[in-house]
Each structure stands twice: as structure tokens, then as C-alpha cells.
Amino acid sequence: MSQVKIFADSTCDLPREWLQKYDIGLIPLYVTFGDQTFKDGVDITTPQLYAKVSETGSLPKTAAPSPADFIQAFSPSIEAGREIVYISLSSELSSTYQNAVIAADEFPEGKVTVIDSLNLSTGIGLQVMKAVKAAEQGKTPGEIAEIIARVKSRVETEFVIDSLDYLYKGGRCSGMQNLVGSLLKIRPVIKVIDGKMTPAYKVRGKREKALEQMLSNALEQRDHMDNDLIFVTHSLAEEDALELKRILEEKTDAREVAVSDAGCVISSHCGAKTIGILYVKKE
């Protein structure tokens, strides 16, 4: 067991079996429908989230873990004599990072290192896996923080949004945009830039066209990819994800191309059939 335990939150979208295999601590965000509050991935799954959206006709609110949640999660590892490195959802998207910093101040100095991923979904997960590898090699929290500081600006995160409905319901585009987008079958592509979700471009026409464009963008970078790991992350789009995985395995030198499911918080902002390709560029 490493002296340093790596933590993430539920938005990292890492496969559940990886969390167990690599001893990664996970802190859930919250999803609220009316007066009902659920822990992401603990009390509610992504298919259940979509069923509730259909039932209620509205999107849930999402909320960060409280400082008390972090203290409760971190305490057993600290009491066991371990140090913690926690990699958070982008501070540009949530107060999760700030709440973790507040919690870290409740422990002796240096026991908890909090890192802002400036990313989301497996854009965080890629950084978490780099941290896990460093911890296994005996790196200190400070050394791990330095490694992640060099990695996070090189994470490429690109998602095809299948429908504007969730962006519209969540207040991220106007009703007219939603109507026009639906009529023209416009599929927005989102990138993460400086920690923020940024519309990169739009693809008009069939879903397959948008997926082909995203795949083409990734393959153009194949010579610049860190070949450790590529993620294909999706929200109820497993068939497409497996096909993208097959092509990426065939056309890149990646040691591993992994498929992962988007959790409830990510899905509530992007909607069903959202799919992304995420990787790290070489230094």
C-alpha cells in the first residue's frame, strides 16, 4: 500500500473497478430533484437520473460536497498515517475545489494536498491515474502535485452533445437556439479550455458525422498523444463508445483505450448519448 492515498470526486467518471483496484477514494457530488437529494453514483445511477428527468420534466440541481463531507472522507486515511492527494472537478465549474481546500485546513499542514484539475469527467480521471502511478512509485504529495501541474494543461477533452435539450433546460442556451438546433439537427461539440466548458464548433446533420469529426480531430494528434491511456467516455452511448475504442486501438499506439460511463452530474449537464474522447498530449 502506498503511503499516499489518491482521492477524486464522482465527476472523474473512472470505472468503478478501477477505484477498487487502485485504492482511489471517491467523494460524491449531489443531485437534487425537488426535495429529494441523492449522492451521485451512490443513491442514483445515470439511467435512474434520466428516468427522473422524464418523469418530472425538469433537470436536477447539482451541488458540491461540503467541507464536512471531505473531512469525513479524508479522516480514516489520515488516522491510518497516510497522506492524501485529492484532484477535484474544475474550480471554474463548481465550488468542490474550494470546499476541499477548507477541509484540508482542518488537518495538520501537508497531510492533504488539493489539486484543481481544471477539467471534468475523465479529463480528471486521466490526471488521477497519473497520480496513482506516481504514488505507487513512492512520490511525495509535493512531487505528485508537480507532475499533475505539468499534465493538466495537456489534457484534451472533447465531447459531442447529441441534443441541445439538456443545455437548454439547464439554462446554457436559449429556447430559440434549442428550436433552431433541433430543426437543423445541429450537434454542438464541447471542449474544456482553461477549466471551462467551451463550445468548440457545431456539426450539422447526422450524429455519425459529428462522431467522425471528433475522431478525426483525435487521430490528427496521434503522434502527439501520450500513449499511456485514452478514454472514451459516454452517457448511454455504449455501442458508439465501443466502436470509437476499436478504431482508436487500431490507429493509435495507446497502451490502453478504456471506455467509461459518465456519472449523474456530468450527464445532467450534457444529456443522453453524449460521448467524448479524452487523452493527454506529450510534453
Image (cartoon, rainbow, N blue to C red):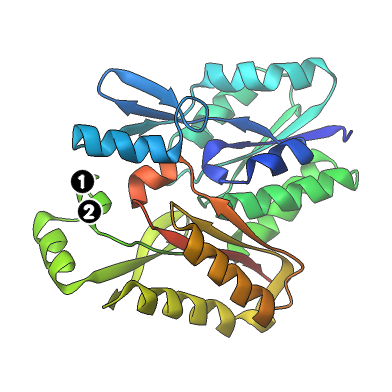
Q: Could you tell me which residue is drawn at 21 percent across and 71 percent down?
A: 185
Circle 1 crowding by C-alpha within 10 Å: few under 14, some 14–19, many from 20? some
Residue type (three-letter) at the residue carrying disc 1: Lys
* Spot occupied by residue 122 in the image (x, y as percentages of width and height): 57, 53
Judged left or right of residue 65, residue 114 is right
Q: Position of residue 117 (x, y in %)?
A: 58, 49
Residue at 57 percent across and 29 percent down: it is 100
For the question of whether residue 155 can be seen, the reply is no
Is any part of residue 99 visible from this angle? yes
Query: What residue appears at the point 57 percent right and 45 percent down from the top-left corner?
Result: 12
Marking on residue 165? 2
Q: Residue at x 60, y 57 (%)?
A: 259
> Mark 1 to mark 2: distance in Å?
6 Å
Q: Give the class, few, some or many, for how many residues have Cα within 10 Å of label 2's Cα (few <14, many ≥20).
A: many
Q: Are marks 1 and 2 in contact (CB under 8 Å)?
A: yes
> Which residue type does callout 2 highlight?
Asp
Residue at disc 1, secondary structure: helix
Task: Give the label on residue 169, or none.
Answer: 1
Measured as percent of width and height from the top left, residue 39 is found at 47, 26
User: In the picture provided, is 226 more to the left or to the right than 215?
Assistant: right
Residue 242 quadrant: bottom right
Image-based side of 271 in relation to 109, left or right: left
Q: Helix, strand, or loop for circle 2?
A: helix
